[in-house]
Structures are given as structure tokens and as C-alpha cells.
Amino acid sequence: MKIDLRNTVLAAPERIGGLEFEVICPVGAVTGQQWKLTATSAEVGTHSLQISVKDAAGHLLGKERTTLRISPADSGKGGNAALLILGDSLTHASLYPNELARLLSGEGNPTWRMLGTHHPAGAAEGVFHEGYGGWTWNRFQTLFDPKAPEPGKVTSSPFLFPPSNAGAAPVLDLPRYFKERCAGQLPDYLIIMLGINDCFRANPDDLASIDSTVDAMLKEAETLLAKFKAAAPQADIGLCLTTPGNDRDGAFVANYQDKYTRWGWRRIQHRLVERQIQAFRGREKDRMFIIPTELNLDCTAGYPENNGVHPNATGYAEIGSSIYAWLKSRFALRSAGR
């Protein structure tokens, strides 16, 4: 596990290389601009972790403290875990769900099952999810094609069903979804990675515009989350923080020419993560948790040269390992009744 320290701050491309990061933690070590840890059984438990950042002249710009929790390697062993993953094109690619499945299949883990109706060509055996390119929180609640209402299709949300009366609106029915499309299985863990398509087109030069766009997204998120809480009240919900993009300007030029830029998306993404943390932190009693998927992602080695927001196999594996780390923590705490 690692923290790419560059992902913890918002700094213009010409400034990021001049920043100095310091990490105070009894475990792990800083290498360049990354803090890395290969945990041992002796380090199981909780540890304080503080990150400070200074400018080139040594002036302190900010610092934050958090708690690092290292779980036993056999957390969850002997149990069962049903997972449902929601997302956009990063999930549709199926590479991070594949990595998650690979990790869960190792020793010391529960018997697992991935719920969902979508099994794209790139999905490994047993890997199912609800991840569709271009989707948003809103699309999962509104997108419906009466001519093709089948689940697992990009034209209709798997959670929507035809209305009983012709001309009426489709019905969002999660209990029916679990009953008919998941063979009656409720998820133990709901993992959601959405946000890019909701906010990508905001004006990066206008903070009010970004916040207005995020406000609309969070409203949609809270509506869908409430429905999931009602339908699967015992599920732990892991909310993935939106990942930063490729740190190569040329990758954004290749995808979007001059319409959307690396620095533009970086400003939007950083503000979006701030708002996601504000909205979802402190809600553990409601079984809602933040997964810091943006921290363990190397924005150079984890991306191809010609794609702005979609990682390569290395980057997707880093996302998968972040989600796996969260699951191992939850396995351990749930077994302790927490």
C-alpha cells in the first residue's frame, strides 16, 4: 500500500515538483513523493499518520493527521461476502473488479460473490457489477429504454422496471432488483465509484460553478443511497473518492484536444474530493464509509500516455487494492461487532 503524496494537495503542474512532503508514522517510509508500506503481522493495529507539506523555501503550507488501521491478513476467513459494485467506465473496464476478485480469492478471505447483471468481455470469471461508460448517479435512477429494458444494457438502469400503466414513469425498485436479478441475495458490501461524469464538464475557473455541479451530484447521491439503505440495511456502503487524472498534458490533448485540460480536471477533481469527504465523513453509524481510492494511484505509472482519466492495468490494480484494503478492515471490524 502507498500514498502518492502529490494526490493529497492541489498544486499547479509547475509547482508540484517543488513541494516537500513529510510523513510522520511509526510504520512505512517515504520514497520520493510516495509513502509506502508493506505491513507485517507485528504491525497489525492502529497507527497515527501525519502528512505535512512545505514549499521550496521550507515554509509549512499545511498538515493533516489521520489514523492508519492495519488489519490481520486473515480478516474475514471462513465467512461469506456478497459484493455489489456500481460505477462508470472505470468499472465497465472490469480491471479493478478483476483485481479485487483475484485478491479476495487468496488465502485468509471469505467466500465471495459479486452481484450484478453486467459481465463485459473484459470481466473475469465470477466478476459481475453494474458499471457503464458515461453513467452518473442520476442515470442509475432515470435511464430507461422501454424497447430494451433488460438488465446489463447501457440503455436502461438495472434498478428500473417497466411501469404498470402505459405512459407512466419507470419504477426504481431495489427490492425487486435483488429478488429477480440477484437471485434474492442482498449485498453485504456496496461499493460505488461515481463522480467523473457528474462533474467533468464543470467550469474549472469558477469555484461556484464547480460547487453547484457537485451540489447537484450529491443530491442525486443521497437519494439513491437512501433507497439502498432501505433495501439492504445491513450492507456496508463504501464510497470511492474520485480519482485524479493522468499527469500528462498530452493525454488530455489526445482525448479532448483543447476542450478539457489536465489542470482543469485536476481542480475539479480536487474540489469534488473535498466535497465528497465533507458529505460522507462521520457516517459510519449509518454503515457508510469513505474509500480513499485517489491516494494509492500513481498518476504517471498508473496511466497510459494517451488517456486522461482511464488508468492502465497498473492503475486499475492500485484502485482494486485500495478497495480490498477497505474490505479487509471491514471484515475485521464486523467480526468484532463494529
Image: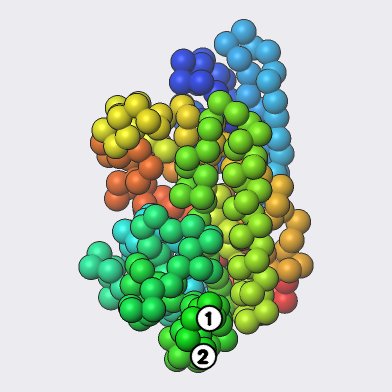
In percent of the image, x 58 and y 63: which residue is there? 238
**Residue under numbered circle 2:** 164
Mark 1: secondary structure: loop
**Residue under numbered circle 1:** 168
Badge 1 amino acid: Ala
Does 111 sit above or below residue 57?
Answer: below
**Could you say which is closer to the camera, residue 157 or residue 100?**
157
Q: Of all residues shown, which one is farthest toward the front?
A: 167
**Could you say which is closer to the camera, residue 117 or residue 303?**
117
**Mark 2 crowdedness (10 Å alpha carbons): few <14, some 14-19, many ≥20:** few
- Relative to residue 207, is residue 121 drawn left or right? left
Percent coordinates x, y for residue 48 in the rendering: 70, 44
Percent coordinates x, y for residue 81 in the rendering: 51, 79
Looking at the image, can residue 2 be seen?
Answer: no
Q: Are dots 2 and 1 in contact, CB under 8 Å?
A: yes
In percent of the image, x 46 and y 15: which residue is there? 14
Percent coordinates x, y for residue 28 in the rendering: 55, 41
Percent coordinates x, y for residue 247 in the rendering: 39, 30
Measure how far apart labels 2 and 1 are at the Cα level.
8 Å
**Could you say which is closer to the camera, residue 251 or residue 78?**
251
**Could you say which is closer to the camera, residue 326 or residue 286?**
286
Badge 2 amino acid: Ser
- Quadrant of image for the C terminus: bottom right
